[in-house]
Image (cartoon, rainbow, N blue to C red):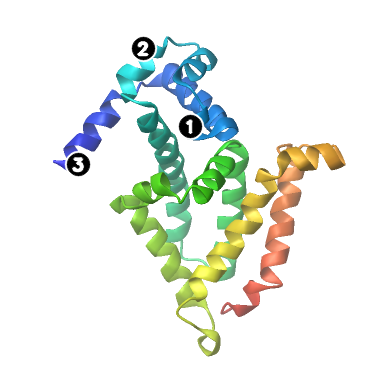
Amino acid sequence: MKRQKEKQRRDLTPEGSTGTRILAAAEKLFAEKGLKGARISEIAALARVPPSQINYHYGSKENLYKAVIENFYAGLQRRLFPIMMEEISAPEKLKRLISLGIDILAEKDHVAKILLRESIDSGRYVNEMLSKPYLRETFEMADRFVYSNLRDREKHPNDTIHVISSVLGCMTTFFVAASTIRELWKKDVFSRRMIEERKKEVIEFVFHGIGNRFNT
């Protein structure tokens, strides 16, 4: 029954340019104002659709917020999974995952702020998304990848928590601090040059720190 309801909700999600505009507008306003601060009327105006259309497809602002989060994680899963399945060395796989993760955060420039807000607000909606089997499987796969490739002499049950948190922190903080970087250094973190520089910086930092804990 639960799966059927989820399928019904997905089937009601508008497709094509209209659906893309709604989700893009929702991402922007949820990032700027949070779930409580953003209004359906504002999202509709930015997406250039009548508010009734958002209400029809999503039913509530909370459901739209969930759709934004799930849309991000579903896209993340689709793009990370092929790399996770590749038969390449652990360091090379980690480098590719970092590079792709930074590209995804740069494309979804508002999502990092939404996830930060979620963490501050106890992460209720993100946790709800992560309970979905297909997303849980991806994170469990990442957990196994990290733990199985750490050197035996250094393994600890909590190592995967610290390693994954450190890598994600290096990747997301850059985009969360975009406005500060723009103000202080007059740099656009979403420019192609800055994104490529960030990839090199994070990979360099990771592999001279936690990367030394991996088997080669």
Horizontally, residue 170 falls left or right of residue 115, namely right
Vertical comparison of 171 with 141: above or below: above
- The residue that disc 2 covers is 52
Residue in the picture at 56% in, 47% down: 116
Residue 89 visible to the viewer: no
* Observer able to see residue 213: yes
Residue 206, position as x, y percentages in the image: 67, 66
Whole-angstrom CA distance, mark 2 to mark 1, is 19 Å
Tell me the number on the disc at residue 36: 1
Q: Is 163 left or right of 128, judged from the image as shown?
A: right
**Residue 18 percent across, percent down from the top left:** 43, 17
- Mark 2 belongs to which amino acid? Ser
Which residue sits at x=35%, y=31%? 63
Secondary structure under tag 1 reads helix
Q: Position of residue 208 (x, y in %)?
A: 71, 72
Determine crowd level at label 3: few under 14, some 14-19, many 20+ residues with C-alpha closer than 10 A: few
Residue type marked 1: Lys
Sequence-first disc among 2 and 1: 1
- Secondary structure at badge 2 equals helix
- Residue 43 picture location, percent across and down: 49, 20
Point 41% across, 59% down: residue: 139
Q: Marks 3 and 2: CB-CB under 8 Å? A: no
Q: Residues within 10 Å of mark 1 (few under 14, many from 20)?
A: few
Left or right position of 130 against 48 = left
Quote the CA–CA distance across marks 3 and 2.
26 Å
Choose the circle earlier in sequence order: 1 or 3: 3
- How many numbered discs, if any? 3
Of the two numbered discs 1 and 3 in the rendering, the one whose residue sits closer to the viewer: 1
Sequence-earlier tag: 3 or 2? 3
Secondary-structure class at tag 3: helix
Residue for badge 3: 3
